[in-house]
Image (cartoon, rainbow, N blue to C red):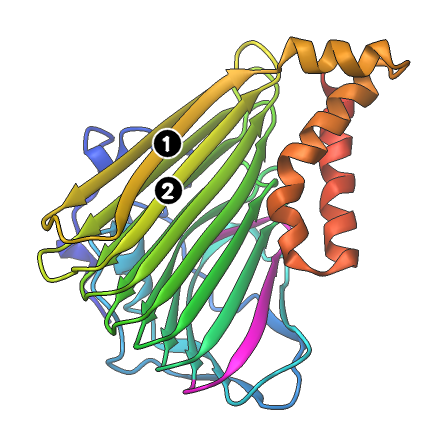
Amino acid sequence: MLNTNIIHTPTGREEAWRFTPLAKLRGLHDGSAVVGEAHSLKAKQVPGGVTTERVATDDHRTISDDVIVQRVVGQKSTYKITIDGEVNEPIIIGRDSLGLDKAEYSRVLVIAKEFSKATLIFENTGNSLIAEDIEFVLKPSSNLTFVTLQEFESDAVYAGRHHAIVDKDATFKSITVTIGGSLVRILPTVEFIGQGGDVDLQGVYFASAGQHLEHRLHVDHLVPNAKSRVNYKGVLAGESARTVWFGDVFIRAAAEGTDTYELNRNLLLTDGARADSVPNLEIETGEIVGAGHASTTGRFDDEQLFYLMSRGINIDDARRLVVRGFFNEIVGQIKNEEIEDRLMAHIDGELAKVGK
């Protein structure tokens, strides 16, 4: 196990932590959280071609400069998911609610074997205090879609890294939905290790009063001829609703032929909400297909609302239609009607509180 005595404790002045309210992490960042023995992950649907097992942690782990991840990778056991062949039904992993008295440090390893294809869904619910590191190893020509749903109860705290290692001609798509929890801080990161890799990182988040939702992405183009796309959308409503999106794409000198673009859009529904958005490109070679980024944060389009209201739609329904349209581009890609309806119903419930 790692010696946590030598792990640097953030103060909030560091660039990686300057937006995060450290007190709300309940000790996950400084080692003061009491770690329990229970494991919350549970397999809800495991089709043929997939195995899930809890194994002793081996040396297959990547280095991270995030202090919470450093504490997680030192855990003795790992929840391992292995995917072999083309899996037609989604793999669904759920979570038990463990409460807030003790923290869980959870390490997950997902291996997608060569030429495999699958959709993996993590349903995060309940009231828990969780630090997690999920590592995806995509072998050559594998294809994995990962859907992670943060539907926690109002006091839950979740801090995790979702790190994909993408080999030759492999495809990785991530859809991150964050609508629950007191504080959620997710680090979706990608490391290309083989040419021809294709990564698509999609996400939506809805922050209501008092919530802090933070997504810090890093895509590392280490090799030539890889493609990445990032598209995150957020809606904020309520006093002190807070979101942070940080998107960093690093194109190294050897990564000729890179094609990348990142986009973040935020919609503010009420006064008192704040969205921080920081897109960043680091480019060490000019021999690329393309690289760009964009970020927008604004209020409701009054003309759009007026148009809908002029057609006899009341303001609450008009607002709901606009937000549903804003999110549906990404939520609709989950391709699971039950989950999509559940997420939209939750968002409708939050919208109903606006203005009350």
Residue depicted at 60% across the width and 46% down the height:
330
Residue 301 drawn in magenta: no
Q: Which mark is residue 262?
A: 2
Where does label 1 land, which residue? 294
Left or right side of 164 for 242? right
Identify the image quadrant of residue 90.
Answer: bottom right
Residue depicted at 77% across the width and 32% down the height:
349
- The answer to which of 243 and 197 lies nearer the viewer is 197
Q: Which mark is residue 334?
A: none
Left or right side of 132 for 72? left
- The answer to which of 173 and 20 lies nearer the viewer is 173
Residue 141 in picture, x, y percent from top left:
40, 81
Residue 117 in picture, x, y percent from top left:
53, 79
Residue 63 in picture, x, y percent from top left:
20, 64
Q: Is residue 139 visible?
A: yes
Q: Are marks 1 and 2 in contact (CB under 8 Å)?
A: yes
- The answer to which of 191 and 28 lies nearer the viewer is 191
Residue type pointed to by label 1: Ala
Q: Circle 2 sits in a helix, a strand or a loop, which is it? A: strand
Q: Is residue 179 above or below residue 109?
A: above
- The magenta-colored residue range is 113-131
Q: Is residue 229 above or below residue 308?
A: below
Calculate the distance from the C-alpha at mark 1 to the C-alpha at mark 2: 7 Å
Label 2: how many Cα within 10 Å (few below 14, some 14–19, many 20+) = many
Q: Earlier in the sequence, mark 1 or mark 2?
A: 2
Q: Is residue 151 above or below residue 133?
A: above
Magenta span: helix, strand or loop, mainly? strand
Residue 61 in picture, x, y percent from top left:
26, 73
Q: Is residue 132 visible?
A: no
Q: Circle 1 sits in a helix, a strand or a loop, which is it? A: strand
Label 1: how many Cα within 10 Å (few below 14, some 14–19, many 20+) = some
